[in-house]
Image (tube, rainbow, N blue to C red):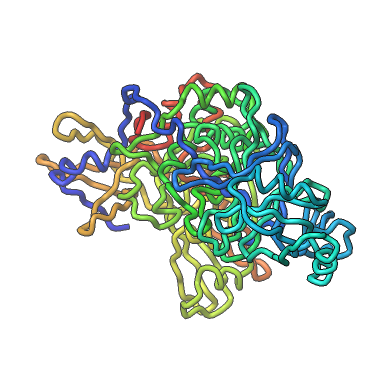
Amino acid sequence: MKRKFVQFAALCLSAALFLTVGGGRAAAAPSASGGRIIRVGLHYGTGAMEGLNLQNTVGSGFRFGYYDSSNRFVELGRTAQTAISVVETMNIYYGSYNSYTSYHTALTGSSIAVGEYHLQLPGSYADFAGAQAAASQYPGGFAAYIGGTYYARVGNYTTSAQANAAMASLGVAAELKWTSEYGVSVVATGTNTILFQYDDGNGSTTGLGVEPIQTGSEKCVTLSKGCLYNGGFRFERINGGKLTVANLVGFEDYIEGVVATEMSESWPLEALKAQAVAARSYAISLGTQHGKHHFDICDDVHCQAYTGQTKTGTNTRAAVEQTAGQVALYNGKAAETYYYSSNGGASQSVSVVWGTNQSLYPYLAEVADPYETSLNLDNSWTRTISSSQIISALLSGNNVTPPIVSATVSSYTDAGNPWMFTFTDSAGKSFPVRSGRVYTGLGLPSCRFGFAGSGSGQPDPAPSAPPEDVSINGTVTVNGTLGLYAIDGSGNLTPLGGEVYVITGSGTVPLGQGGGQTTAPAGNWSGSATAVNGSFTFSGRGWGHNIGMSQWGAYAMANQGKTYQEILQFYYTGITVGYV
């Protein structure tokens, strides 16, 4: 490996970027998240719904309306029904389909059908009460809010012929109506009784809003698809499709739901507090992640896992309350605090995993993790991948002569994670691939891995001289490369490793590895492999992308008496804990 030289003067000028530094908690300030509403996507895209059930567990019925541009609820009507379903306004039928009992268009044989044809009584009304009073004079009557105006409608029929036959016996002039592809109806669950209908006519608003009616001081809780939620819901048929459903909820209630979903209520409080700050920072830093779906953040691991208040308890509530509004800060801004289950012994730099410009995320650097290691977790795994899969996922577009016959971890990071792999084909050609691409391309469980078998890889030889302390401007001392980066002419950062020297006024000084390791952990897996029956078996430890905080590592640190600030500052290089 070529020696890397870093001019001492340049190192001095860039010390703030190069060094892993700690920091205390910022001075207390009012919470920026207080009173804020966040829009959490529950069902969208391929998971959009035809019908969704809502049931009060705390509250006394529901309000109907819409959310304005400031996420404030504007009420249009209400019902005392505590079990309702919101459905597309088309012929839809009640029953069980794909393991969910609600309303589905495919259940045409069901005896409970909500038809798309209605009879509209003459005139319009100034408010919900007027429309409801007029509609209630007829069986199956309901209030509708269509294009910004209240109407009274009667019945629901699956064919126009049925509707016209009913019109003849209605005894009053009426008009046959149906709603547009953007319309939604609210029905009493398990019946074809429509309680309210909403249609803006062209999809120009943000859809129907539904909120539980508050009765007393206790927060309303709504049950939907086995989960309990605070706040309200918005149902929108984007481009006339199925129902996109978002939970509009107070920001701190959302954070509590994330903490309870991502960690166990029984875990140490300091670990839960670290998770609360990380979840809050991540949500704030992301902003609106799902603009095309008209919400901010989703409820699965694409963003952050969230099941509402389903798993919350005393400890998760305390963790959120005791850190209210606090975030991880870097240069005065909320850091993108990625986290994952476990790292198997070391976190990884974002540049290694995703090829991201490290200078944009200096706090997402690799960290050797003795805390998680102390738990002796059963987090080992193996995956067998064929040569053809490797070529397709990692080497397409290269002049590969199949099959791949051997593979090697050609270099490691200071913390012992793989940095580069080299794959060799049957013609003897070699192809280097960054380990992060191997992890993502092959869908491996974590970034700390090698090949099945014992032993370690073949690292570059360590410097012959032991690492020496190097003082920068007499104020900061470094004695290794862990957490240090080289800046190129474009401002890109590259983690320093291997033989690194600093040119000082008195000569060349080796930095060494500063406590890091350059081989895979001995005994866990091998650094090289040859194909067996056309396949390679990868072996590793940990679960997740290894970027940022290990949740099991936070658990271990909390059990050893570390505070949530110490946990966060261990995993996120150079951050402070404070407010934005």
- The answer to whether residue 35 is left or right of residue 530 is left
From this view, report whether residue 37 is shown above or below residue 245: above
Where residue 498 appears, as percent x and y from the top left, is: 34, 49
- The answer to whether residue 502 is left or right of residue 30 is left
Where residue 243 appears, as percent x and y from the top left, is: 64, 57
Snapshot quadrant of residue 342: top right
Residue positioned 55% across, 32% down in the render:
253
Where residue 351 appears, as percent x and y from the top left, is: 39, 53
In the image as oriented, which residue stretches furthest toward the left?
A: 505
Q: Is residue 147 visible?
A: yes
Quarter of the figure that contains the C terminus: top left
Snapshot quadrant of residue 34: top left
From this view, report whether residue 494 is shown above or below residue 406: above
Residue positioned 71% across, 31% down in the render:
60
- The answer to whether residue 579 is left or right of residue 291 is left
In the image as oriented, which residue stretches furthest toward the top?
A: 561
Where residue 246 appears, as percent x and y from the top left, is: 58, 48
Quarter of the figure that contains the N terminus: bottom left
| Front residue (pair 284, 175) | 175
| Front residue (pair 284, 554) | 284
| Front residue (pair 423, 339) | 339
- The answer to whether residue 148 is left or right of residue 86 is left
